[in-house]
Amino acid sequence: MSQIALPLELAGVAGPSRIVAGNANAAVIDAFANPAAWPFRTAVLSGPPRSGKSLLARWFAESGAGKFRGEAIDDADAVDETELFHRWNRAQETGTALLLVSNTGTGAWRIDLPDLASRLAAALHLEVGVPDDAMLGELIAIHAEMRSLVLDESAATYLVPRCERSHLGVERLVAEIDRLSLERKVAPTMAIWREALEAVNGVQQPRLL
């Protein structure tokens, strides 16, 4: 498992300052290495909420990922279609790799402008997937670090098999652990981990006898 540091210019943005690289985004990161191979140098990136799509896009555009001039448009599915088509044309004219971030999910982005629809249908489609155990552990660690929340090594062992298998699920879980710990003015223990799991999952965790 590895992490990718974001450019210094992004230090003020909300969210993690590093990208956890793992099974869920490995194909995306690999594709960023060679945008010249993308059809028309265009790719569409989708994935679940809070799965790091915007961070990946910013890293691609601002760090020179792939050593190729690139532009990223976040929330592209909310941009006026005519404007988006013009930006696609400009990218073609300047030889710029264009990464479009969609929040509607693969195959769910409905485009009414025929010219734009045909161009994006031909683009490379990338998707952030479901994190495996190793990546979940790293995500728990980075969200805890963001909150200056100290979790011992046994925390991931306990939490990973029981938590929701998503980026958003991990974010909510760590936030709940932090809330309970601050509310009770105690370090997070297994009792707090269990209660946080129950709060975010809605399922009672088994007690040790």
Image (spheres, grey):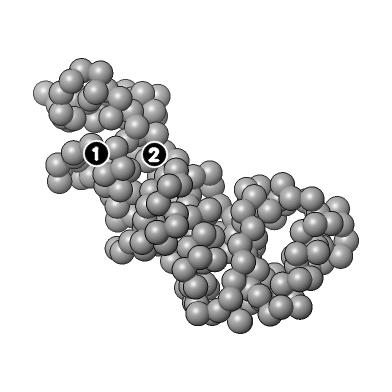
Disc 2 crowd rating (10 Å Cα; few below 14, some 14-19, many 20+) is: some
Residue named by callout 2? 171
**Looking at the image, which residue is at 61% across and 81% down?**
37
Q: Pinpoint residue 169: horizontal percent, then vertical percent.
A: 41, 38
Q: Earlier in the sequence, mark 2 or mark 1?
A: 1
Q: Could you say which disc has been placed on residue 44 in the image?
A: none
Disc 1 crowd rating (10 Å Cα; few below 14, some 14-19, many 20+) is: few
Q: Pinpoint residue 84: horizontal percent, then vertical percent.
A: 77, 59
| Cβ atoms at labels 2 and 1 below 8 Å apart | no
The quarter in which the C terminus is drawn is: top left
In the rendered image, the vertical position of residue 50 relative to residue 83, given as above or below: above
What's the residue type where badge 2 is placed? Glu
Cα distance between the residues tagged 2 and 1: 14 Å
**Looking at the image, which residue is at 18% across and 39% down?**
150
Q: Pinpoint residue 102: horizontal percent, then vertical percent.
A: 64, 53
Residue named by callout 1? 148
User: Dot 2: what SS?
Assistant: helix
